[in-house]
């Protein structure tokens, strides 16, 4: 069997696109998410170079079972893509939902911690491990109505940077990819509780926002560099987005 790549949040969007792309790069992809039906459809599409594992990254027991499943595949684990995450709500801090903030922290930050911690021994044992974490431009810029999400993504970036320092001298690269506007089927729709008008407004007038395949391409690039090359942090935006607050929208 080929080297293994684990991709969390693989049931849709960037995660699904990354799973497809890594399979073409020669990895055996372990596609991880909660929605088993979506994962099974994805794995059926990819073919024999993929395995579906239902896992909730907010559960210690579920992540432990993921690690056991990966170990049972009998091949080196050389790549982990921490992609599971998301945003909920657009409330100002004064009206912020504690439940939404707690969910965003648990998925984006503690989910990254749980999975990285569980799989790190196997990544190190491979002798050529790589951890790629999908952050966001919200990891380093705040904006009104985004307090909970930006706080979680800032914390995720702090986790990634700390991990890179702590793994110095060990055979594990730590990569962070921070996308700007990426239009996927679900991210904005889930953020606004299924409100299609609010979700569409995020991208209104933006000629070509990034798409999931754009980010998958960058993940594959980072993961397939010679192992002595570490891309610490890569920020990627559509050309229409000059900065977090500067977006060209056509009339």
Image (cartoon, rainbow, N blue to C red):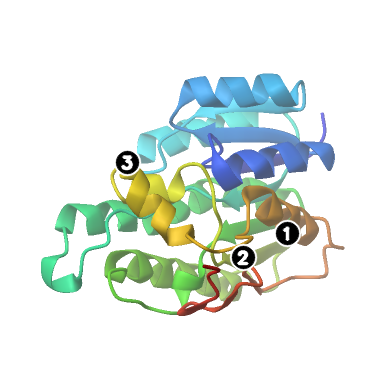
Earlier-in-chain disc, 3 versus 1: 3
Earlier-in-chain disc, 2 versus 3: 2
Q: Which residue is mark 2?
A: 177
* Residue 114 % position (x, y): 43, 50
Q: Which mark is residue 218?
A: 1
| Horizontal arrangement in the rendering, residue 111 relative to residue 217 (left or right) | left
| Horizontal arrangement in the rendering, residue 14 relative to residue 173 (left or right) | left
Q: Which residue is mark 3?
A: 194
* Residue 55 % position (x, y): 45, 32
Element class at badge 3: loop
Residue 13 visible, this orientation: yes
State the image quarter where residue 58 is shown.
top left
Q: Which of these two is toward me, 211 or 111?
A: 211
Using the numbered discs, state the Cα–Cα distance from disc 2 to disc 3 in whole angstroms: 27 Å
Element class at badge 2: strand
Using the numbered discs, state the Cα–Cα distance from disc 3 to disc 1 in whole angstroms: 29 Å
Q: Which of these two is toward me, 66 or 196?
A: 196
Q: Which mark is residue 24?
A: none
Using the numbered discs, state the Cα–Cα distance from disc 2 to disc 1 in whole angstroms: 8 Å
């Amino acid at each position: 069997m080929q080297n293994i790549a684990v991709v969390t949040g693989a049931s849709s969007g960037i995660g699904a696109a990354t799973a497809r792309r890594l399979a073409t790069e020669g990895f055996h992809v372990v596609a991880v998410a909660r929605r088993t039906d979506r994962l099974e459809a994805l794995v059926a599409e990819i073919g024999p170079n993929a395995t579906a594992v239902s896992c909730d990254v907010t559960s210690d027991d579920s992540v432990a079972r993921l690690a056991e499943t990966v170990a049972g595949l009998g091949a080196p684990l050389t790549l982990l893509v921490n992609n599971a995450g998301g945003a909920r709500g657009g409330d100002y801090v004064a009206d912020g939902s504690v439940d939404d903030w707690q969910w965003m922290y648990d998925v984006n930050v503690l989910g990254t911690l749980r999975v990285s911690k569980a799989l790190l021994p196997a990544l190190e044992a491979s002798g050529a491990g790589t951890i790629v974490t999908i952050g966001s431009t919200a990891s380093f810029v705040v904006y009104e109505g985004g307090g909970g999400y930006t706080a979680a993504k800032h914390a995720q970036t702090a986790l990634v940077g700390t991990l890179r320092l702590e793994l110095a001298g060990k055979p594990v690269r730590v990569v962070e990819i921070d996308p700007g506007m990426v239009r996927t089927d679900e991210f904005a729709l889930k953020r606004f509780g299924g409100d299609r008008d609010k979700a569409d407004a995020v991208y209104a007038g933006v000629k070509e926002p990034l798409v999931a395949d754009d980010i998958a391409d960058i993940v594959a690039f980072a993961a397939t560099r010679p192992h002595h090359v570490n891309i610490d942090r890569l920020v990627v935006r559509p050309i229409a987005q000059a900065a977090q607050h500067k977006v060209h929208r056509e009339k």
